[in-house]
Structure formats: structure tokens, C-alpha cells
């Protein structure tokens, strides 16, 4: 087993040579065959710019897209947790009806490509749900003060119907994965626990709420944290139905500015910062939680 | 009333409950389909299911010709096959490098896994297609395979690592006691055992590869999703075609999932030891 201290050896030299060789070759091709003019100075301006009239700093396209992705993730995460929680509990319910319904939901969504689900949802459900909710008319009827709060929470009001359909789509899709985590968490609680609770005369709601779920939630936290990061990544798919988040603004900008390489590298870096930062944060929290529990 | 009568009554009640639940479930399904049809009616949608079979296959003079959808499904399978091969290569390399004594190998593998796991697949596809492909003159099919394999490879690395670590410690010690080199231990002792542990999750990876391969329609590789989108643009049969495409994917993934279940029952699962 490789437990020795890591030292610089021939393998390191080989790997460094291959890595540098590959990177060098790509840059060489880009420079001398593709003749790409790198222009990184433009990128900060796409993130944030100074407003010409007021002189204040405002977010530009990429910055707005990033913010929209964060908003989508936060609300999508909450909604997915709600859907996943309910469906997950249904998956282990006594009633066959609930089990069948939740099973079909989870299996359908987990077995068709996210992209296909998003397109079906977009063409079909969003065209029907949005008119029922009447979002546009309601926005027109609200006063400016609430609109400001709405804008802070959900982004520009004129894009709200668009944002909502993307949000529901994302949450329905992630909800199926959350449901599986919830189910696994509940099933990981030893059967003796619920039997003991039943023996104490609790009814099934009490057994679930007071005995099983509190223990199951502890087990669900690490996979849920992972799923939250998946949600951030999957939110990029929503760009394909014209929801204006980071990937969408990236596409727009790459086409309109022509700075394809820089824009896509920046978009990737932004996603990486968000996901990697959160992953580190979650790991630290988990670590602290685990340490706390040991004492 | 004797105990047996109570038992029988309970059992009967349970059976009725099950029948009732199944009926309620079917009723909900019917209700949902009615909503779909009714909703489409509100949009004045004209259902033309009878036109779908010709896009799946044609029979001329007794000979079978695949239609665009089946052809696309073939491309999807081809894409998945090639990517799976490359995925195994990337994943195994990353897993072995992560375990190696080499400092640079460890760093390179970590860098690869972290970058891939913390950026969206779609953005990676764009990076490969818009940046790497024009620079290196890659075909779009090759770009798609590369992007898919790079993405899944990071997840395969984790599977391989878990598989290698699940091989009992005694196997390493026995290998070393026999005087085998580290390379020989890996090659002849550990990997043959790890493969058995890794096979079921790897098939699961193939399922997710099929699902992710739908993304390459974004760069216009002629897979099942692309064919579906093209046909929709031609015929405006949005719902029929999307449902058919979804059903075809469902058929592919569920049949592979059945294989996974079968494998998991046949082979020992990691953690149980034997």
C-alpha cells in the first residue's frame, strides 16, 4: 500500500512533462495555427461596469447571470427539498397508492435525460402552468415597493415568469434525486427504532416525526450537500430553454463579443468558484458537526 | 371471535386496501393523461400519433430501414460505447495516480477530479467544443466523446478508488510477502478482484452516460435528441416526438438498470468482503 512519504521521482517528472507538453501544445496551436488574439482585459468589464449616468458600479451581463444562478440555486434548493421530502416520505409510506405514485415520479425523472425532461416540461407544462398562475398580470398589479423586494429575491420582474418556469422545472427534476436521498436516510434508521416507538403507543405520524426523521436527517446531510452542488451544476441546463442564468449570458456574450475562449473560461471559473467553495464549506461544517457529536 | 378470524379479517382488509390503492393510482394516471390531452386541446393541439412510426422505421419490399429516430438511437449508443471506453481509461488512470507515491500524479489527478466535479457538464462541453476542438481540429463527434468521457471519468475515478480500497488489506500484505512488486500486486492481485466489485457501479455509470449523451445535441451531433429536435422543427409534432424520444431513452436506461440489478445480485457488493 502506498503509505510512503511522497518524494520527487521519475514518475513525477514524466507526469509533469506530459501535462506541460499537452498544455504547451494547445497554446502553441491556439497561437500559431488558430491565430487567436487573447484579450483578457475585456472580461472584468463583463462582470461589473460603471453606470454612465449615475457613476455607480452595477453588474454587467456575466455578473447578472451569476446572480441569477445563485438565486435559482437557493430557491430551487428549497423547492427541491420540499418536493423531495414529501416524495421521499411517500416512497416508504405504508399506503401502496403513495408508494406507486412516488415511485413512478422518481423512476421517470431519473431514467430520462435531464435535457429531454427540460424540453418536455418547457413546451408542455410551462405553457400551461404560467397562464394559470397569471404571473404577468399580478406583477403589473403590484406596487413598486413590493416589486423592489421581488426584484431583490427573484431578479428583474419582467423576467419573473421565465424565471419561475425554470425554477419549477429545476426543482421538479432535482426533487426526484432528493427523494431518493430521503428514502435512503429513512431506511438507514434501524427498524427497531420505529418498532419501539410503535410499542410506546405512538401513531404513525409521531413515529415518523419524532423518532425516525430526526435520526434520518443526520444521515441525509452529507448526500444532500452533494446534491445541492449538483443542483448548481444542473441549473446550467436551464439556459437551453432561455432562462437567463450564467450559462445563458455566457452564450450570449460569447456570440456578441466574439471573445469565445475568454468568456467560456470565465464562466467555467465562476461555476468552479461557487461549487468548490461550497463543497469546502460543507465539508468543514460536516467535520465540525461530526466532532461535536463525538463529545 | 378467535384469533384466526381476526387474522383473516385483517388480511382481507389489507388485500382490499391494496386493490383500492392500485385503482386509485390508475385513476390518478388517467387523470394526468386527461389533463395533458385537455391542456393540449386548450392550445388547439392536433395529435398525430399515426405519423410517428415512419420516423422509427420503414419497411420497403420486406426490408427493414431504420428511421431517423432509430438511427439517432444508434448514434447515442455509439457515442456511449466510445465514451465508456475512454471513461474507464480516464477513471482508472486518475484512481491509480491518486493512490500512487508520485506527488505530481496525485496533484494532477486531484486537479482533474475537482475541476470536473465542480463545473457543469454543459460548460465543459462548450469548453471542449468551442475552445479545444477548433484549436486541435477535432471532429464534433470526437469532441462530444471527449467531453463525455472527461466528465464521467472523474466519477469513474471515485468508483475505481472505492473498488481498489475495498479489496481486503490481507491481499496486499500477501502480495508483498510473496515478494511481488507494487506494479505486480496491482496487476495480478488487486485489479482482478477490484473489477468484480466495480462492475455494478460501472454499469450504473453507463446509464448516466446515456442520459448525459443527450447533451451533445447542443453541439449538433446527430444523436437521438438531435434527431428528435430536427423532426420537431420539420413537423411541429412537439409532444408526440418528445414523448417518443423520452420513451426510447427510458427503454435504453431501464434495460441497462435491469442489468445493474442483475449484476448486483450475482456479484458480491463492495463492503461485504466476499
Image (spheres, grey):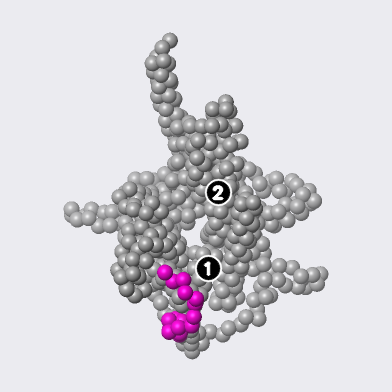
Task: Identify the residue at horizontal 38%, vertical 16% (top origin).
Answer: B4
Task: Identify the image quadrant of residue B147.
Answer: bottom left
| Crowding near the residue tagged with mark 2, few <14, some 14–19, many ≥20 C-alpha atoms within 10 Å | some
Q: Chain of mark 2?
A: A
> Measured along the vertical axis of the image, is residue A148 above or below residue B120?
above
Q: Chain of mark 1?
A: B
Along the line of sight, the residue nearer the viewer: B234 or A144: A144
* Secondary-structure class at tag 1: helix
Along the line of sight, the residue nearer the viewer: A226 or A240: A226
* Alpha carbon separation for disc pair 2 and 1: 23 Å
Residue A172 in view: no
Which residue of the protein is positioned furthest toward the left in this rendering?
B62
Residue located beneath label 2 in the image: A220
> Measured along the vertical axis of the image, is residue A16 above or below residue A2?
below
Along the line of sight, the residue nearer the viewer: B191 or A20: B191
Instruction: Tell me: A67 left or right of A34.
Output: right
* Secondary-structure class at tag 2: helix
Instruction: Tell me: B49 left or right of B63.
Output: right
Q: Position of residue B69 (x, y in %)?
A: 34, 56
Q: Quadrant of the N terminus of chain A?
A: bottom left
Magenta segment: A1-17
Q: Position of residue A152 (x, y in %)?
A: 73, 56
Question: Are tags 2 and 1 found on a single chain?
Answer: no
Indicate whether residue B168 is drawn in magenta.
no
What is the count of numbered marks?
2
Residue located beneath label 1 in the image: B114
| Crowding near the residue tagged with mark 1, few <14, some 14–19, many ≥20 C-alpha atoms within 10 Å | some
Residue A9 in view: yes
Amino acid at each position: 500500500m502506498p503509505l510512503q512519504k511522497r518524494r520527487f521521482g521519475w514518475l513525477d517528472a514524466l507526469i509533469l512533462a506530459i501535462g506541460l507538453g499537452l498544455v504547451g501544445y494547445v497554446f502553441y496551436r491556439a497561437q500559431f495555427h488558430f491565430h487567436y488574439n487573447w484579450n483578457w482585459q475585456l472580461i472584468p468589464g463583463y462582470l461589473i461596469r460603471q453606470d454612465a449616468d449615475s457613476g455607480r458600479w452595477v453588474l454587467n451581463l456575466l455578473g447578472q447571470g451569476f446572480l441569477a444562478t445563485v438565486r435559482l440555486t437557493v430557491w430551487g434548493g428549497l423547492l427541491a427539498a420540499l418536493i423531495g421530502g414529501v416524495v421521499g416520505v411517500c416512497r416508504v409510506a405504508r399506503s401502496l397508492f403513495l408508494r406507486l405514485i412516488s415511485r413512478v415520479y422518481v423512476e421517470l425523472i431519473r431514467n430520462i435525460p435531464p435535457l429531454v425532461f427540460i424540453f418536455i416540461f418547457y413546451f408542455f407544462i410551462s405553457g400551461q402552468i404560467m397562464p394559470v398562475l397569471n404571473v404577468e398580470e399580478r406583477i403589473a398589479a403590484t406596487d413598486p415597493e413590493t416589486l423592489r423586494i421581488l426584484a431583490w429575491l427573484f431578479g428583474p420582474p419582467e423576467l419573473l415568469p421565465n424565471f419561475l418556469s425554470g425554477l419549477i422545472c429545476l426543482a421538479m427534476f432535482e426533487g426526484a434525486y432528493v427523494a431518493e436521498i430521503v428514502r435512503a436516510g429513512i431506511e438507514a434508521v434501524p427498524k427497531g427504532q420505529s418498532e419501539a416507538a410503535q410499542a410506546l403507543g405512538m401513531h404513525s405520524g409521531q413515529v415518523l416525526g419524532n423518532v425516525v426523521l430526526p435520526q434520518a436527517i443526520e444521515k441525509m446531510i452529507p448526500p444532500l450537500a452533494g446534491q445541492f452542488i449538483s443542483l448548481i451544476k444542473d441549473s446550467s441546463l436551464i439556459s437551453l430553454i432561455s432562462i437567463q442564468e450564467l450559462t445563458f449570458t455566457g452564450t450570449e456574450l460569447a456570440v456578441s463579443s466574439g471573445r469565445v475562449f475568454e468568456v467560456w473560461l470565465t464562466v467555467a471559473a465562476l461555476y468552479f468558484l461557487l461549487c468548490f467553495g461550497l463543497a469546502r464549506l460543507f465539508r468543514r461544517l460536516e467535520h465540525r458537526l461530526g466532532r461535536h457529536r463525538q463529545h | 371471535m378467535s384469533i384466526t378470524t381476526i387474522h383473516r379479517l385483517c388480511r382481507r382488509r389489507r388485500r382490499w386496501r391494496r386493490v383500492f390503492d392500485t385503482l386509485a393510482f390508475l385513476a390518478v394516471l388517467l387523470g394526468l393523461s386527461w389533463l395533458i390531452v385537455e391542456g393540449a386541446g386548450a392550445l388547439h393541439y392536433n395529435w398525430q400519433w399515426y405519423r410517428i412510426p415512419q420516423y422509427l422505421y420503414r419497411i420497403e419490399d420486406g426490408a427493414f430501414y431504420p428511421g431517423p429516430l432509430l438511427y439517432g438511437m444508434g448514434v447515442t449508443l455509439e457515442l456511449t460505447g466510445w465514451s465508456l471506453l475512454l471513461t474507464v481509461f480516464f477513471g482508472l488512470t486518475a484512481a491509480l495516480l491518486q493512490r500512487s507515491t508520485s506527488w505530481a500524479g496525485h496533484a494532477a489527478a486531484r486537479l482533474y477530479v475537482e475541476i470536473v466535479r465542480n463545473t457543469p457538464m454543459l460548460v465543459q462541453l462548450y469548453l471542449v467544443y468551442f475552445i479545444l476542438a477548433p484549436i486541435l481540429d477535432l471532429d464534433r463527434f470526437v469532441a462530444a466523446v471527449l467531453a463525455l468521457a472527461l466528465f464521467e471519468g472523474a466519477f469513474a475515478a471515485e468508483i475505481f478508488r472505492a473498488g481498489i480500497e475495498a479489496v481486503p488489506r490481507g491481499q496486499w500484505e500477501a502480495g508483498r510477502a510473496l515478494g511481488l512488486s507494487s506494479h505486480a500486486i496491482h496487476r495480478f492481485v488487486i485489479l482482478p478482484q477490484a473489477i468484480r466489485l466495480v462492475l455494478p457501479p460501472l454499469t450504473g455509470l453507463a446509464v448516466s452516460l446515456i442520459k448525459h449523451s443527450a447533451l451533445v445535441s447542443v453541439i449538433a451531433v446527430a444523436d437521438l435528441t438531435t434527431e428528435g429536435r430536427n423532426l420537431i422543427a420539420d413537423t411541429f409534432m412537439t409532444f408526440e416526438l418528445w414523448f417518443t424520444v423520452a420513451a426510447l431513452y427510458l427503454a435504453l436506461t431501464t434495460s441497462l438498470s435491469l442489468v445493474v440489478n442483475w449484476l448486483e445480485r450475482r456479484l458480491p457488493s463492495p463492503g461485504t468482503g466476499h
